[in-house]
Each structure stands twice: as C-alpha cells, then as structure tokens.
Amino acid sequence: MLATDLDGTLLRSDNSVSDETRSALTEAEEAGLIIVFVTGRPPRWLHEVAVATGHTGIAVGANGALTYDLHTETVLNEHLLDVDVLAEVTGILRQKIPDIRFAMEYGLDFAFEPEYRHDWEIIPLQDRQGRHMPAASTAELELLLTKPVVKLLAKGRALEPDAFMDEVEALVGEHVTVTRSGHSALVEISAVGVTKASGLAALAESKGVSRGEVAAVGDMPNDVPMLEWAGRSFAVANAHPSAQAAAGTVLGRTNDQDAVAHLIRALMTQRGR
C-alpha cells in the first residue's frame, strides 16, 4: 500500500496532477499496489481529485475523519466531532483567544462565521470540471454548532502558524486532535484520536495490509502521525521540518518535480514489477 498526501505532495503547486504522476498511479494500481490518498481535504474537494487521477484509489479525507472511494465517489465511513465537544472547544478557544474565528466542514457542506477569512476562495460556484458546488453558508457561531462536523477550522490573526497551533493544542488538545496543513495561522481540529494515521491504519487493516507493507509520503504537520506509523515513510523535498523529521527518507524532489511519481516507480522496481 502506498499512502500519499495530496496538496504539496502529489499535486503540483497549481493543484494539477501531472501526466507522469497520473501514469505512475495507473501503473501502480494495475500492478496490485493499493493507492491511498490521505488528505486534509473534505469530500467536497475530492471530486476534482477523482477526475484528475482517473478515479484511481481510495482517499482517507479530512485528516482521517472519513474514507472515500474515488472510483465511485462515495463516503464509506466517517468519524465525526460531536456537537457537545464542538461547543466546549469553541467556547474555550473564544474565551482565551478572542479574535479567533471558526468554520465548519460538515462533509459536503461548509459554513463559517461572518468574520472568518480563508487563505483561498472559500467555495467556488463550480469545480474545475464545471460541476456545481454546494453553496457555503454564513452564520453566528451558536448557529453553526447544531450538528456534528468532520473538521473544525480555526483561524488566528497575525500569529506565526506553528505558535498558533501550539497555543490551540495547549488549550484544547485533551478534548480533540489539533493539526495544520497550510502555511498560515489556520488549524484543523478533529475528534480525539482521529489523525491521518488512524484513518490509514483502519483502511490497511480492512484490506489485510500490515503496517510494514505500507509506505507513506507527505509534507506538512498533519502528515506526521501517518509518517510515524507507516512501515516506510518519505517526505518530499519541500516538506515542513516536522514532516522531514518524522520521515525515514527525505526525497530529492519536490511536489513540482513529481516526487511521488518517481517514488512509485522506485517502489515498483523494488517489487520487481
């Protein structure tokens, strides 16, 4: 089994999948290698990945909170952050960090506080294939806390990203799992114990694949649990220091140099395929 992160790892910086990478993924799956995309993306951001990769593989989405079949584009299972914990965590963070703002990933739907500001377009009307995307909603926090989420997003202001994540972790880490995948003061919060490693481990077990038969590759702090869990682990050359430290090997190529495609072909050669 090969488990790869998407943004900053398999995808190029323009979010495209290169022809070389698409070809390597197809060859690997045809040869019997199980391809798993392990990503922070929720289901609403996975359709374009399914199309771009030729509907290849399975995705562990929302940092381990759900499993998504890219062949059929359906959610197989999910582990949600319930409303009681959601209310407690947002209450603690709002009290201690008054200018923090929240957004909720419900799966296919997305909602956010009026003053929440993302680092990219929050939700376009269409994806790159022209498919209509569900509209996002805006509401005061108390109205966003009425149903479970796959991921809570918390945005700081004018704070260094790692320091912000550390502060949030110190405040609520006993109640939830805190991580980040971007380059700003934005943290991603899941139910306690839910990480890319937990999602990948459950999927591997369901496929009869042992930990030692899993190779993983990533680039950001949210990839660290997966890199530490996998039997073999790799970080792309552009990876965050924490991912490089967690990986057994740092690749000599970046995401824009198709590092994952080269890794796949190296693994295939080692398997004699």
Image (spheres, rainbow, N blue to C red):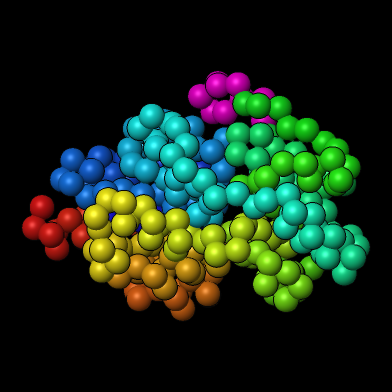
> In which quadrant is the N terminus drawn?
bottom left
Q: Nearer the viewer, residue 147 or 134?
A: 147
Q: Is residue 157 magenta?
A: no
Q: Quadrant of residue 112?
A: top right
Q: Main secondary structure of the magenta part?
A: loop
Give 30 or 87, whichever is nearer the viewer: 87
Q: Position of residue 130 (x, y in %)?
A: 55, 21
**Residue 98 in sight here:** yes
Residue at image location 49% in from the left, 64% down from the top = 223
- Depth check, front residue: 248 or 194: 194
Relative to 175, does residue 77 appear above or below in the rendering?
Answer: above
Q: Residue at x 43, y 31 (%)?
A: 73
- Above/below status of 51 relative to 93: above
Placement of 247 over or under 108, stated as above or below: below
Give the image location of residue 154, x and y in percent: 75, 56
Q: On screen, 65 above or below 93?
A: above
Left or right relative to 265: residue 86: right
Magenta segment range? 124-132
Q: Nearer the viewer, residue 44 or 22?
A: 44
125 magenta-colored: yes
**Residue at left 73%, top 62%?**
185
Position of 195 with respect to 187 (left or right) is left
